[in-house]
Image (spheres, rainbow, N blue to C red):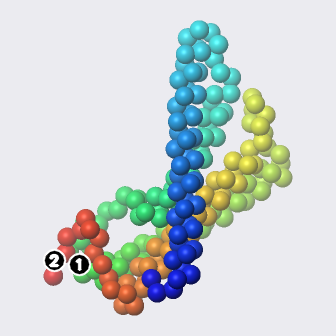
Amino acid sequence: MTDPSIGTIQNLNERATLWFARAGSAGLAAMMFLTLFDVIGRAFGHPIAVSVEVTELIMGMMIYLGIGYTTFKRGHIRVDILITNMSARVQSVFDFITGSVGLLIGVLISWRLWIQAVSRYDNNDLTQIAEASVWPYAIIMAVACMLMVTSLLFHLYTTARMAFGIDEAVVPDNATLIE
């Protein structure tokens, strides 16, 4: 990358998405222990009343907390059977096209999450048993989705520079190139 400010912003994005992913991992562990203790409690006739609600909230958040870092590291599943034998620049063009579609979908999801978060706040939506506010969790999911969108923007910036010949196109390590 030629612009140092892009590198700084990208570094901040990586750190933020990493911390969100770590929080998602902690949520997974908490959900696991909550389920374990709920099952043990049920065996003795004392289940945890809010276990289903808390599990649902954590599960929803885990998805969004981890997706930004996965996007930043380009860890999503990729089917590249057709393009592995093409040149690195052609692969960059295809990456740019699929990245553009992914960005469009990511922006739409983020936009709808923000609408949902504001709606949850305006309506003062609560969980059924614990009567906890839902809007803070919705806002966390929307912020995490925005980090996914910024990761997609960095990916799109990099692939555009390679696709248009500004930077040298590079074949990913796990791909084979036949010239």
- The location of residue 26, given as percent across then percent down, is 55, 41
Q: Please name the residue that numbered disc 2 is placed on.
A: 178
Q: Quadrant of residue 92?
A: bottom left
Horizontal side of 4 relative to 169 (left or right) equals: right
Identify which residue is drawn at 48% across, 80% down: 157
CA–CA distance between discs 1 and 2? 7 Å
Mark 2 is surrounded, within 10 Å at the Cα level, by few (under 14), some (14 to 19) or many (20 or more) other residues, namely: few
- The location of residue 111, given as percent across then percent down, is 66, 64
Count the marks: 2
Q: Please name the residue that numbered disc 1 is placed on.
A: 86
Say above or below: 53 vs 99. above
Say above or below: 31 vs 151. above
Q: Amino acid at mark 2?
A: Ile
Say above or below: 83 vs 167. above
- The location of residue 40, given as percent across then percent down, is 55, 16
Task: Specify the label residue 126 is tagged with.
Answer: none
Say above or below: 107 vs 66. below
Of the 4 image quadrants, the one containing the C terminus is bottom left
Q: Quadrant of residue 48?
A: top right
